[in-house]
Amino acid sequence: MLVAVTWCAAAGHAADWPQWGGGQQRNLVSRETGIPAAFHPGKKKRDRLGFDPATAKNVRWMVRLGSENYSGPVVARGRVFIGTNDEDLDDPRFRPTRGGVLMCLDEQTGVLVWRLVVPRLEIDRSLVSEDFDDMNLGICSTATVDGGFVYLVTNRCEVVCLDVDGMADGNDGPFREEATFSVPAGAAPVLPGPHDADILWRLDMIRDLPVFPHDAANCSVLVVGPHLYVCTANGVYDGKVVLPTAASLIVLDKQTGKLLARDDGTISADVFHGQWSSPSILDSPRGQRVIFGGGDGRCHGFVPLARDARPRSPTPILDRDWVIDCNPPGYRARGDIAIDYWALVRGKATSIDDTGLVVSPNEIIGSPVVVGNRVYVAIGQDPVHGPGRGALSCITVDGAEDGAEARCLWRYTGIGRALSTVAVDDGLVYAAEYAGKLHCLDADSGELVWFHDTQDEIWSSPFVVDGKVYIGGRTSFTVLSTGRRKRTLAQIKLGSPVWSIPCAANKTLFVASQRNLWAVEEQGEMRP
């Protein structure tokens, strides 16, 4: 029964891949076929691209990004959308500002169709340290394409709605400030051309809500009917939550960007560090639920807003149906003594288990993955905190007289801290930990089937397509076979870390390193 449910619920039928996880359930599984197990990125070359396309194998095209990439590629309507930074922006109209860029490329050729340039976040420097510039890693959000619209969270913690066709069909929508939007404050306006983005509306979460983001604002926007669900990235400064009653999850009207609802602020009050998870959707026996992995280390089930909701004052509070702590007993406290998250981070205290791993409270960084009535979600910490004990929870959501009831079906603690979202396919769960191990578990029982040590840092997530598992790391891109018998198919060097997650669409695999994006297709040139 689980296999059948998994097949139906797996995101990404053989076609486009228009959002993070391919669909609302965020499961990193595609039904594409004919995807090669290996490719050669090309011989290294001392030029802007860094590789010689003529020597690449199983590659249709490659494109240079900036100097950093954390945004996953998505494919829709003949276009590929990917975020990066402006360190290597090849356009004399703009100077690098440590800001962000969303690139819209032609799916078949990789030629630039249009791009959105977002300068670095300009704030009162007396309020924060230079560390706050971690916000300026470029655009880390993975775009969501819905019809003719692109929804994105920028490096300045803004939610924007873009015209999928850019400025080629004119400046549409009520927003008309593109000339000043894409240049630093006080700089001369730059009139947009046909290869620039067309912004339809914009919400500045820092100023309009307000929130205080920590590190990258990287939520991938979830579209549910006429509404958008967005993680605000509200977090800490110097180990303390700046705005403890601020929203962590908000709901916007997708046509106007108007705020319709928010959570009650209790998540922010308990945030450990930051909030980087993207919401997903579950169809429970009592109706849909929006699933959100909080910076408090808990998984939350919210009742979606009514379709006819309108902006009101004060802003309505979302109804939370259930909440489950994804930190096992002993992670938050030893006996009656709470474990100080920040004391451990700063090396002022120790809580070590019998294997030598640090045990402490963790937040949810990856997205909760929904398969049928189950939610799979891992916990972890910022990679700069190093390795430690993690956990992977399987939550089942069943009907009850007064709402949906959630309980933890099983929990696997053999995994370390994870930044990753899992992939669930054919009765198996593929989960990666920061310290480099890929775990394959039985989706029904949580029992370990096998694990593979890449001996590499993993910030990426496992992606399953065509009988293969792809996983990026600091030094290599690894390909394994799916199933209960582990087999290594390829280990590919791409010249820089692979921190984002690949995707597959229309018989093509799209893989991004920190500096380049490859469109990989089967050309019969390499075999595992």
Image (tube, rainbow, N blue to C red):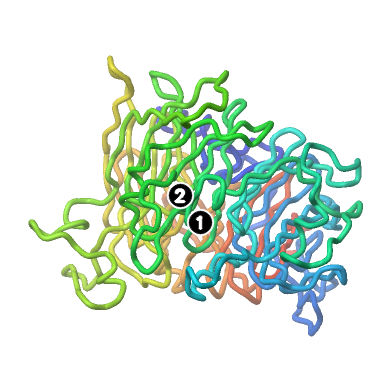
Tell me if 92 is positioned left or right of 440 in this view.
right
Front residue (pair 395, 165): 165
Q: Amino acid at mark 1?
A: Ser
Q: Position of residue 94 (x, y in %)?
A: 81, 69
The answer to whether any part of residue 17 appears in the image is no
Relative height, residue 506 to residue 315 (above, below): below
Please tell me the numbered disc located at residue 461: 1
Dot 2: within a 10 Å radius of its alpha carbon, few (fewer than 14), some, or many (20 or more) residues? Answer: many
Front residue (pair 508, 146): 146
Relative height, residue 250 to residue 269 (above, below): above
Rendered image quadrant of residue 224:
top right
Q: Position of residue 477 (x, y in %)?
A: 58, 67
User: Mark 1 falls on what kind of element?
Assistant: loop
Tell me if 477 is positioned left or right of 372 in this view.
right
Q: Which residue is mark 2?
A: 422
Residue sitting at x 17%, y 51%: 329
Q: Position of residue 220 (x, y in %)?
A: 57, 47
Q: Amino acid at mark 2?
A: Val
Residue at mark 2 to residue at mark 1: CA–CA distance: 7 Å
Front residue (pair 230, 67): 230
